[in-house]
Amino acid sequence: MSAAPLIELTIDGRKVAVAPGTTVFDAARINGIAIPTLCHQQNETPVGVCRMCVVDVGARVFAASCVRPAEAGMVVTTCSERIESARHTLLELLMADHPSPCARQQHSGDCELETLARAAGIGASRFPRRAPRPQDDSSPAIAVAHDACILCDRCIRGCGDIRNNFVLARMGKGGATDIAFDAAAPMGESTCVSCGECMVSCPTGALTNKFVVSTALGAEHGAQSATTEELLALPVFHNVSGTFLELNKNAVIKRRYRKGEIVCREGDFGSTAFYILEGKVSVSISSPMAHVKTSGGERGFLSRLSSLLVGRANDHRAEDVTRRSIPIDAPVDLDYNHPVAELGPGELFGEMTCMNFYPRSATVRAETDCAVLEMLRNVLDTMRKNKTLRAQLDRTYRQRALEDHLRNVPLFRALDQEFLDRLRERVELASFAPGQLICRQGEPADSFYLVRLGFVKVSERHAGGELVLAYLSRGDYFGEIGLLGEGARTATCTALDHAEVVRIPGEEFRAMLDRFPSVRGGLEAVAQERQQANHERMAVLGSVPLESFLAQGLMEAQSLLVLDLERCTRCDACVNACADAHDGVTRLIREGLRFDKYLVATSCRQCRDPLCMVGCPVGSIRRRSSLEVIIEDWCIGCGLCAQNCPYGNINLHPFTVQADDPDHPGRKRAVVRKKATSCDLCTNQAEPSCVYACPHDAAHRVEPRQFFGSLVGAPAQRDAKGAK
Amino acid sequence: MRIDRTHTGWLVASCALLGAACVLYALARPTASPEPMGGTPLGLAFGITGFAFMIFAALLGARKRVPVWRLGRAQTWMRGHLWLGLLSLPLILLHAGFRAGGPLTTALLWLLIIVVASGLFGAALQHFMPATMTRQVPLETIYEEIDHVRAQLRAEAAERIARAKTIVVPENPDEEGAAARGAEPAAPLAAFYEREIRPYLDHAPGPSVLADRAQAERAFAGVRLLLPPELRDAVDDLENICEEERQLARQARLHRWLHGWLLVHVPLSIALILLGAVHAVVALRY
Amino acid sequence: MPRTRTTKKLAQRIDLNYFREARPLRQWKFRLTLAALALVLAWIGWHAARRDNAVYSAGKLSAAHAVFSNRCSACHVTAGGLFLVRKVSDHACLDCHDGPIHRASQTFTPSCASCHADHRGAIHLAEVSDARCTQCHANLQTRTGPSHLVTHIESFASDHPEFAVLRSEESDPTTIRFNHALHMQPNLTGPSGRVQLVCGDCHRLVSNASAEIVLGQHAAGAGMAEATYAANCASCHTLQFDKRFAEQVPHDTPERIHAFVVAKFQTYIAAHPAELRELRQPNRDLPRRPVPADYRLLTPPEWVAEHTGEAEDLLWRKTCKECHALNFAEGQSQASAAPLDTRLTNLAMLNTELPSVAPSNITLRYFPLAKFDHAQHQLVTCESCHAGARTSQQSSDILVPGIKTCRQCHRQGPQAAEARCFECHTYHDPTLRKFGPGHSSIEDLLSVVRRAPAERGTGAGD
């Protein structure tokens, strides 16, 4: 790189030389001269709207130093009476509308405007205050006080340039200008993803962290604001801007936990991630129960006898526990039979919670005395950009979790260790932003993907519309076809949120296959099966007109529980039977919308696009190869699936489970835990219990297009039993 | 349960059984033994069979208590209940030799007749009442939750009217009646709410104009005339809420019709079984 | 915003546990069931407490047994076992009743209860339906081989045979000569002028207890009294024997008549010794015979014997013979051929001339095995049934009506008199009936629990 000639200019009587393109502000800063700013932030493109940084460059008017490029021979005065007077007036004007003390000033005392105003000796403003603007509290994380906004544009640049979310913009003209989210929607109803960049960038109390305002990063557990020096000393914060840390002092806190204390509980909602500085923690979830039912053992003789009659003794499903590990929001997965793991210094957990506000996936308890850093999203983001941390995360993942994830792929299950070891080293780790395309339907397939973090939507496009096949979360995979180098992608994969995937390039894989030819045969068989299944599915999908279904979303369903209202006597036998078969909790509600003479009961529809699966922090809600959506026993009861289901088919219910007794380690005691419940088609019986128990032949579990076929134009076939 | 073509097998078997029973009776009886039919071997067979059918019919209630036990589908039990229960009447008549006998046996025969008749009545109801309910109550909900839903409707109406009161109507001096409306555009609606809607939803005693659909429509049309177009949604919503309340009231009535006969059928059938057992014990003992 | 209805909104209105809570319909079903059960138990308990077993009965008892309404065990014997179908064993009936068998040759003996079933209300238990009889008699078999009786009888109206007495084509065995046609003529000469006889002048109903025992039936006034000389014939058919006496001979055996006559003559001649001199009666001279003396002087015995002979000749040969069949011994006809003197002097000869009267053989009952109650049939004229009586000239005619006569009224169906078996016949052989005091005290009868006869003491003071 050839060195460009330096520009020489004079600032406050000092001669300085800077590279071409440097702004006057930076030139001054490099040489230790501080110029006050409001709208300028180091990591953002300067826009020069606040005019606080004006300097005298000898022109007719003052120049905003943050945007003005330095020129050779420029004589700059950063501080003179006129400049002072101008800044003073500016500040006074700005303080006129400022609700002093604003939220930021109240809670952390570092509102930049008020600080500057105080330094300039401005108390009450002479100018009249304009009409107050409303507070916007709709966002879960960020409080918006339009009154305190000085339109410095930092948030807009942060949201757009830095985060690429493009949610914020200015709206209105003149004095009625405000920042707006989307088209002036309340922040909570906009497309804002609560990344916090705007909040972090805002110099005043216009955008403040709600949790900062409340107690989330409170003072327990020996919390102390980590000083900037301390933080910078950590290798993971290497190269992070000190100013940033300075500004976000309250977004990261160092906590100390004594042995045995709980750091976080599964199911709680949160917004922070944890980085372990010292000590060890154990990560666990409550003892699982098979398929969300109450624990056995304490029931009486008669109940056990009756459960024989019911056939519950054989509640063993064909493909039980193909998943031998439970994916959680940490660098390691938990083994199904013994869901406990250990994390040590340098490991990061809680990323999903912090970034996407998913509930905590496991309970973390300190095994030894330990010190952790708890941080909000903005700090985590910055940390993740840090190369050291990334390398650390990648390494941890490869060592601890990747193999398990690979083993979960049926394709790789039979591979021997040597193959896997080599494979492990050859994978690439890639991250995607929300909505970003990973691969497109129809493209030549050339890679295999494994999800490490976040959610990926796999969808197919066909004549009738888009069909979401699955939402993949940690440990899921897609694209086996790409490994063998034949065929095009059958589906489009999109990152739903901030997703991190493991990618195995096809040619790498094929190269390895050459070395291990025995594996190829098995892979090809599986691939062919997949192709076949895809063809069939496409054929079925393309054959039926869908419009009349779409209104109720019946098209989304693969299995409906319909009640023939001309036969149903509203006797609740189905509900009682369902409850009896599922420990007293009914999985169906005899209420809903009607279609023709049928009531479409509120009971899991085994949707093609299982929205319920999005966001499960522990991946406990999943779909098996037969249709039904089941909720595995390690469900932590966060309720996200219930919120997501558009039909209200999932409900939370308290169950008595045997959990580790914290007072008597090694022993268990009964506690009440909420778990999500939904209809599982009674696959352990020959017939769903509701259908079995209806005395009037009114309840049917049907595949909707076949069942309603005559009404929507395709040949009717009654009672395809869940289209198995 | 509706009796349709799927019952053909049961119908044929029942007719065959009844026919055979009648034939046997006709063959046995011409000897015109004066002794009570019930005591003869054939009479005893009829009695035992009839009582067994009655017990099976009564067990339907028990079967419904353990719906998931694999003891046979609920529909099979229901069909059995209908047909065997029906057959028990002629069998018992044959058992009794068409004589009522003493006080106990007369009471038993009457109980049986009432139980079977009420059962037939209920079965007849089940052929058309569900369709009637489906047709007349599109906004149906679960019967046991009607009160709960009604409470929610009340809350929804209150919230809706509160929201309506906050709607700001942009003033347009050209429009007729704008001055009259003044600052409270929702006042007529609020008054209507207080006067009619709320008492109706609260089930205040006395007749309500909202209890009848046509009258309610007229009333609401009248209110609509007094309101600006911005409040139309509010009126529609409130009218919808009242319609739902009406339908729920109708649903409750229809549901009681559909299920009310059970209050006769079930207690009397239990009494029938008990008395039948007493009769069996005493008759066999003596 | 218009109201929307989505599945989720609808579902979230519902409380998930609604189906577990008490619902009014179920509650009321439960309560009413309990009430019904309570009522039933109360009813049964009330009757049990009052030891009132009548509630369990299969029908009202007949009037005769109504006093035992509470005592099921009076007839229903539980010793027979729980699963015995017929609990009313014959022992129970025979404790109080006497039910002799029908015939020794019957192939099986039906149980008492199979014919006499109670619990049918206030009926007469003795009124047994035809089917009980025809269960044997429709196809009669006997233990001793083929029966001499008609073997296929289904009912009176259809194939009941002609009455035996008419079927055998024998004639009436009576030895009395009687001509009904003659006697039914008008303008008969009676004791006090012309007379027209009617049936009832000779044939009267009988009503006496001894007849009941003999006839073996319960009816009162059932049979016809036998026609006797004294009651029915004497008023016209007098038995004068001699013009000297107004009296008649007694209607008795020839020996008594002889004694009477002899006594009479002896008394007379003792009182009228002048008659010993018998004058010749010229009108009694017989031609070509020596003319007797003008007078004969007889000794009293001679006189008695002579006139006795004359009288008895009249009697035997004319008066008695008119109705009776008199048998003379062989020696008697020779004796009668002997001259009168010889006869008169030989009293022994005279005595041996007494004839014997054949037994009259009047049939008292034409239906030995059935009963006919004339009293119940009074409404009908005698000739309606006994049509042959007016024209019968011989007493060998059997004037009892045939079954056809009866069938005119006694058929089955409406507008007919009953034709049930028991109206005429009795199953239990009346000749085998025993009568005697029972062995239950009143206390026994009225107590609810039945005691076996062995347990009961004698009737008095148990």
Image: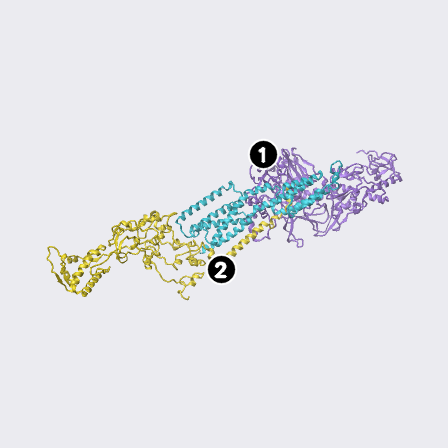
- Percent position (x, y) of residue C297? 13, 63
In the picture as drawn, the residue positioned furthest to the bottom comes out as C461
Q: Residues within 10 Å of mark 1 (few under 14, many from 20)?
A: some
* Residue that numbered label 2 is attached to: C50
Relative side of C394 to C30, left or right: left
| Residue B198 visible in rendering | yes
Q: Colour of chain C?
A: yellow
Shown in cyan, the chain is B
Q: Is residue C344 above or below residue B145?
A: below
* Residue in front for this viewpoint, A321 or C154: C154
Judge whether residue C146 can be spotted in this image.
no
A18 vs A632, nearest the viewer = A632
Query: Circle 1 marks a residue in which chain?
Result: A
Q: Colour of chain A?
A: purple
Q: Could you tell me the amino acid type at mark 1?
A: Gly
- Residue B69 drawn at (x, y percent): 55, 48
Tell if the residue under mark 1 belongs to the same chain as the one under mark 2.
no
The image position of residue A133, as x and y in percent, is 78, 42
Give the quarter of the image for residue A455.
top right
Helix, strand or loop at label 1? It is: loop
The answer to which image quadrant residue C98 occupies is: bottom left
Q: CA distance from mark 1 to mark 2?
A: 75 Å
Q: Chain of mark 2?
A: C
Quarter-of-image position of residue C453:
bottom left
- Dot label at residue A713: 1
